[in-house]
Amino acid sequence: MASRSRLSQAQAAWLLLTPFLATYALFLVYPFFRGVWISLHDWNLLAVAFNPDAKEFVGTRNYERVMWGKDITWSLFNAPILQTLGLVGLVLSVFLRRMNRLSRFNAIALGIVSVLLVFLPGFHPGEGGRWYDRRFWPTVGNTLVFVAFAVPGVTISALLLAAALNRETRAMGALRTLFFLSQVLSVTVVTLIWQIMFSPRQGLIANITETLGGTPINWLTDQQFAMAAIVIATVWWSLGIAMILFLAGLQDISKDIYEAAALDNARGWKAFWFITLPNLTRTISVVVILQIILHFQVFGQAHLMTQGGPNDSTQVLVRYIYQTGFRDSELGRASAMAVFLFLIMGSFSIIQFVIGREKG
Amino acid sequence: MSGVKMNNVIKQYGEIQVIHGIDLQIKDGEFCVFVGPSGCGKSTLLRMVAGLEETTSGQMTIGTRDVTTMDPSERGVAMVFQTYALYPHMTVKENMGFGLKMNGHPKSAIEAKVAEASGILKLDEYLDRKPAALSGGQRQRVSIGRAIVRGPEVFLFDEPLSNLDAELRVEMRVEIARLHKEIGATMIYVTHDQVEAMTLADKIVVLRLGRIEQVGSPLDLYRDPDNKFVAGFIGSPAMNFLDATSGEDGVTIQALKMTAPNPIGKTSKAVTAGLRPEHLEIDPAGDALRVDLVETLGGVSFAYLVSDTGEKIVIEERGDEPVSEGQRVGLKFDAKRLYLFDAETEQRLRA
């Protein structure tokens, strides 16, 4: 009998997985740990490029330099609005849990967010003290503001669009394609389009305001409106995927249920509120978390439309990392910030994972 | 509570007409079953009563109100769907109370009505469960409960038992019959299963291709069908149809090699003779037919016979000694049990 070497199933699996694992390790796992390692060094990009020994191990000093300051103290009413909000949330989560109006999972989630809201904004430099990096926390704040507007913006408009376009007519099919089309454009094209749109001289929005008798807003150079402009462009750009996910979710809801609801006097908005939304909660949470993770990484829009300005009002985390690393050559500090960003996004990934398990 | 009246009701989808001018009156408290093969328009007609399908022309009346153009929720009807159509995100209690909640009833009133319905349907222990945690039969009970809670003038059932297994189907059938007795509301029930139709209905409406073939009580339809279609549809196994000629001396059925007395007393050339399996008896003396197959169910047996003309005949036997396969036999029957139909128009030929 001819002996033929045969692979066991496990061996075959590993063999087939190897290309992926190798690529994954080489381009994701290794750079990640390398990044963490760099963040522990005083590492000047150019100096180390020419002389590999020009780096110095500094432990967590980069983190301290970025996130901490001299004479930092904590007090309860440093940021009264945020911290009060946190306290209210904390009380609510305990109260609603006691009243059994909130599931355990939701109560814990609300509790954690509230604690963070009370705790984190409480830090500030004491008398004579200062932040080592005065731009970092405002940049984090800008990023949070961006996420806080872009995510609901995308989610709500995608949901409404999907609900409106969830019909089997040719026109609806064409509109679906049209709305999805913006998604395939690159960020450079998107920002170009919106720079023109927002232009106070020849832009479409300015033209409309003028026809209506208003003075055109200088969107991109006005500190009040710059962030809004970036959020609007982003919502337009990233509607597509969310809309497709919602459409898929909508198709999962059986038509019979809407007929039963019509007999129960729930049509139109009532049906949307009482039938569609509750049946989409899972899709909504997936979309929200995906969008949060995506939009924390905002870079192109702020970089190309406003260059972080005016007056740093649209400076976002990734852009700051980019500037610190590649303009100022402070690779160690940039890596420390990147690790910070990773932790934020990682925690949202974990939340998504937990939600998926909770309901699945 | 009130009856339902249809006056020349028509349904068109674009150019295609699927319901061709139905006139029908369903009395207050009546249990009316729409029955027919798939595609006959029975579900469409029911959905037109519900308002889920628009009525293209004609008039639909519930009680004394013209509901032809009313919204489903204003018609005072409740519907039980084949797929149950329960709201998956709501508990049994919320499912049943949803209609009242949407109509702005106070919480206490809703709770009372739900409790009452769940008592009738024995759903008390499931009230806080979601539909996913219920069996098919329980789901359909919830769906019926949802209809009861709304206290409608007319209950509509769209093949409510089709998704259940055979045993549950019988159980639920009995339960629906009991419910009708208890509540006494007008009910319209769509099914393709003639056993359900026969057992539940006060009045059966047999539909074919969007037209009414016959309306009547179950026994009327069984005993006195207007045409070959109704005769074949009502009764199980179906009526046997055999080519025959009717002459002065009687009806000659070639397949049975016999001539029976002519029940209609008229002459006409080609007719179709209809004989129900349960009205046929084996005549051991005859040899017109060959026994092809015998199905023994215990109490009764069905024998499938083939004539020399190639026609197939089913008979029901209640004797202890059924015929055996391959045997040649003849058939006899009571002349009163012979139905004749015009071979061309398929209409019943009556005396």
Image (tube, grey):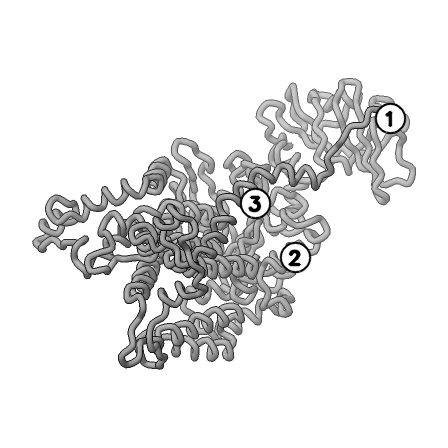
- Camera-near label (2 vs 1) is 2
Any mark on residue B135, and which?
A: 2
Q: Nearer the viewer, residue A113 or B169?
A: A113
Secondary structure under tag 2 reads loop
Mark nearer the N terminus (2 vs 3): 3
What crowding class fits label 2: few (fewer than 14 Cα within 10 Å), some (14-19), or many (20 or more)?
few
- Camera-near label (2 vs 3) is 2
- Camera-near label (1 vs 3) is 3
What amino acid type should be assigned to the residue bearing mark 1?
Val
Q: Nearer the viewer, residue A102 or B249?
A: A102
* Residue labelled with disc 1: B329
Distance between mark 1 and mark 3 Cα atoms? 39 Å
Q: Is residue B136 left or right of residue A218?
A: right
Q: Are marks 2 and 1 on the same chain?
A: yes
* Residue labelled with disc 3: B34
What amino acid type should be assigned to the residue bearing mark 2?
Ser
Residue A268 in sight from this viewpoint: no
Secondary structure under tag 3 reads strand
Q: Is residue A205 left or right of residue A64?
A: left
- Marks 1/3 in contact by CB < 8 Å: the verdict is no
- A177 shown above or below A271: above
Mark nearer the N terminus (1 vs 3): 3
x, y percent for residue A43: 39, 55
Distance between mark 2 and mark 3 Cα atoms? 27 Å
- B172 shown above or below A170: below
